[in-house]
Image (cartoon, rainbow, N blue to C red):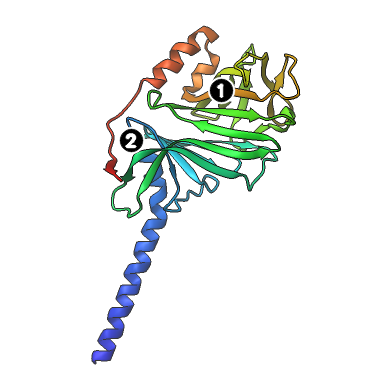
Amino acid sequence: MYKNGKSYRILWILVQLFSFSQLLAQKPTTFVSNLQFNNQYIFQNLADFQDKNTPQFDYFLPLNQQTVLFHNNGFSWYSVNKKDTSIITIRFRNANPSAKIEALDPVKHYFTFDTLKQKFIGYQQLIYHNLYPNIDWIVSINPDSPQAFKYTWRLRPGANINHIQYQSNNAKFKLSADQKSLYSYEQSDTLLDGQLKIFNQSGKPIMGNFIANQNFIGFQILSPIARNDTIFIDPWVSKISFQAILQPLDLHKDLFMSQLQRSLPTKQMERHL
């Protein structure tokens, strides 16, 4: 009788452990979509969060009721409201799937979330080294802009700008009339890649813009450049309303700034290292 009771107890423990593991498997979607921050940081996916609607991701950036998921060949903008969930995924066509990802500028404390045991370090920059040959993709955040992030294409000497190509399986693309802004939109949301700047290692401005081909979005350089120049292509990404792409261009700046100024109280715990 004792042996049978002990066996049942072991079986009960195994069932509870299995149930808990299933709960953890479902946790990521809730966790990733509901974090609320005053100041934004990029976190490594230490808890192996997954979401069936997005590619596997290595780092994530929580925003207000939104999260940007950085995977090995692009990013997904994941947002949740009372009515539905919206995901816009941008992939970099033919990018190096094994590019080294380096997290830089860590803060001096760590974060914990709910009952998770992991200690999450907040970073302010990611560098995807050689995402294309001689081309790095650099992600930067600014605590004063809680609804956006900046990315930079760094083209070292020998790089081919035509290698950079954007694709999406669930969003459509639209360029502004001056080809300085890119809109990626689906049924309920729109991402704006705006405030495009192109310059060399000395800060000298270079003329260029987005271009639309049949199957992808890319860039073109219109100014002469030296062979030993390093070129930086530097837009900001933010989410705007779907209707914004139909509005006159002179309204975009005000709309962009209004999106940046939104913030909600933080819910994460900060602890000093």
Instruction: Give the quadrant of residue 96.
Output: top right
Hey, what amino acid is under mark 2? Gln
**Which callout, 1 or 2, points to the residue nearer the camera?**
1
Within-10-Å neighbours for mark 1: few <14, some 14–19, many 20+: many
Judge by depth and name the residue closer to the eye, 113 or 241.
113
Residue linked to disc 1: 235
Tell me the SS state at disc 1.
strand
Instruction: Give the quadrant of residue 90.
Output: top right
Q: Is residue 26 visible?
A: yes
Instruction: Give the quadrant of residue 264.
Output: top left
Residue, far bottom: 1
Tell me the SS state at disc 2.
loop
Residue, far left: 2
Tag 1 near tag 2, CB within 8 Å: no
Residue 30, given in percent of the width and then of the height, sits at 37, 46
Residue 227, given in percent of the width and then of the height, sits at 76, 24
Within-10-Å neighbours for mark 2: few <14, some 14–19, many 20+: many
Residue 153, given in percent of the width and then of the height, sits at 61, 29
Q: Is residue 87 visible?
A: no
Query: In the shown orientation, is residue 54 left or right of residue 115?
Result: right
The number of numbered discs placed on residues in the rendered structure image is 2
Distance (Cα) linking label 1 and label 2: 24 Å
Q: Which mark is residue 198?
A: none
Residue linked to disc 2: 36
Quarter of the picture containing the N terminus is: bottom left
Hey, what amino acid is under mark 1? Pro
Residue 143, given in percent of the width and then of the height, sits at 38, 27
Q: What residue do we see at 33% from left, 33% from top?
A: 37
Q: What residue do we see at 57% from left, 23% from top?
A: 234
Query: In the shown orientation, is residue 12 left or right of residue 213?
Result: left
Q: What residue do we see at 62% from left, 35% from top?
A: 136
